[in-house]
Amino acid sequence: MPFCNNCGNQMPDLARFCVRCGAGVSAAVIPTPRESIGPTHHLTFHGTGGELLLIYIKTILLSFVTLGIYSFWGRTRIRAFFAEHTRFDNVAFAYHGTGLELLIGFAKAIAVLILLGAQCGVFILATGQTIGSILGGIVAAIGVLALVPAAMVGAWRYRLSRTSLRGIRFSFRGNVIDFCKVYFPGLLLTLITFSIYAPFFWNNIRRYYTNNAYYGNARFSYSGEGRDLLVPWIFGLILTPFTLGISMLWFQLQRFNYQCSRTRFQNAALVPAIPFGDYFLLHLTNFLLAVFTLGIATPWVMIRTVRFVFERLTLRGELNLQAIAQEFIDSGATGEGLESLLDNGATDLGFGM
C-alpha cells in the first residue's frame, strides 16, 4: 500500500485522495511502497532556546568588541550547538569546524573579490577609461557569476566534512566543474522560461548535492524528477496573488516532502509526514513570535522549526552502520567564505528552515 507523502498516512492502492489530509494522489506526493517499509530511525533535538540565546548574546557582544572578528567563532559555536543537540537513534552528531578556519576562508574570499576589482584598473590603464571600464565590468560580472557555484560546492563540502556521527565524518565529493554543468544551464533555462523551469533546476541541484554526499564510505542517493514538481509549482505561482503568498508556502512543503521521499541511504528512505495545516501554523506562530519580541525569540523560532521537522521525518529501512568505514575528505573554508560574502543560499535543499 502507498503512503501519502503529505502526511505519511497509509492509503489504499486505488485511493485518489488521502482520507487524513485530503492530498491528491500524484507522483509528487506518493512515494513507492518499498521506500516506507522496514525499521524506523529517528532524528531528535534536545537543545533549548535559552541556551541558544546565550550563545547569540555572547556572539553579538564579542563581535562588537572585536570589530566582527569573533563572529566566525560565534557561527562555529552555533553550528556545534545544533550538531551536539541533534541525535540519530539517540546518538549525537558532532561538529569539528573552527572559527579560525572560517576567518581564513573569509580572508581568501575577500582576496578573490579584490583581485576581481583590481583587474578593472588594469583594463583602464591598458585601454583607456571608457573601454577599460566596460571590459573590466564584464570580466568582474563573469567572475562573480562563476564564484556562485564555487561557493555552493565549497560551502557544502566544508560543512559536511566538519560533521560526524559515531566518530565517522560526512563528506561531499562533487567538484565545481561538474556542478557548473548543472548550475549554469539550469539557471539560463529558468530565466528564459520566466521560472517555469525552476522545479527542474532545483531538483537537479538537489540530485547533485545528494548523490555526491557520503557518510564514511557509504553514499546517499536521490531519485526525484523535476517534472513531478512542475504542476505544484505552476499551481503555487498562479495562486500567489490570491493567497498572499500562502500557495508558495504550500509548494515549499510539497517540494520538501517530495525531495525527502526520494532520498535514500543504504536500504532506507526518508519518509516525511508533515500536514500543511501544521506547517502553516508553525510559520504563522514563528512570525508572530519574532515580530512581537522584536527578534529576541529568534533562537526559539529556530529550535521550534528544527523540532517540528525532526518529529515528522523518519528514516525507514535496513541500515548497516557497522559496515561503514571512515573515509575522511578534508576541505578548506574558502567556499564557505565566498558563500558568506555572496549570501546565495548555498545549502538550500528545500527544507524550509
Image: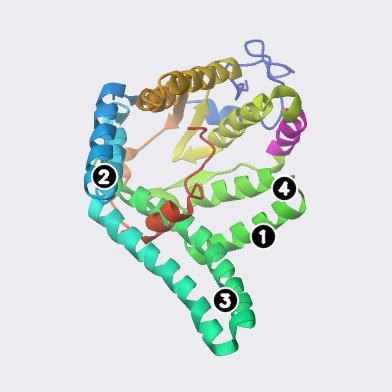
Please tell me whether the stretch drawn in magenta is mainly helix, strand or loop.
helix
Q: CA distance from mark 4 to mark 1?
A: 11 Å
> What is the CA distance from the residue labelled 4 to the residue labelled 3?
32 Å
- Apparent side of residue 161 relative to residue 112 in the rendered image (left or right): left
Q: Is residue 123 above or below residue 195?
A: below
Q: Of label 1 and label 2, which has the lower sequence position?
A: 2
Q: From the top left corner, tell me how far across and down residue 9 is, in percent.
A: 58, 16
**Which residue: 61% across, 30% down?**
31
Q: Mark 3 highlights which residue?
A: 136
Q: Is residue 175 left or right of residue 73?
A: right
The residue beneath circle 1 is 185
**Residue 331 visible, this orientation:** no
CA separation in Å, label 4 and label 2: 41 Å
Spot occupied by residue 174 in the image (x, y as percentages of width and height): 47, 59
Q: Are marks 4 and 3 in contact (CB under 8 Å)?
A: no
Mark sitting on residue 197: 4
Q: For numbered disc 1, what is the local secondary structure?
A: helix
Q: Which mark is residue 171?
A: none
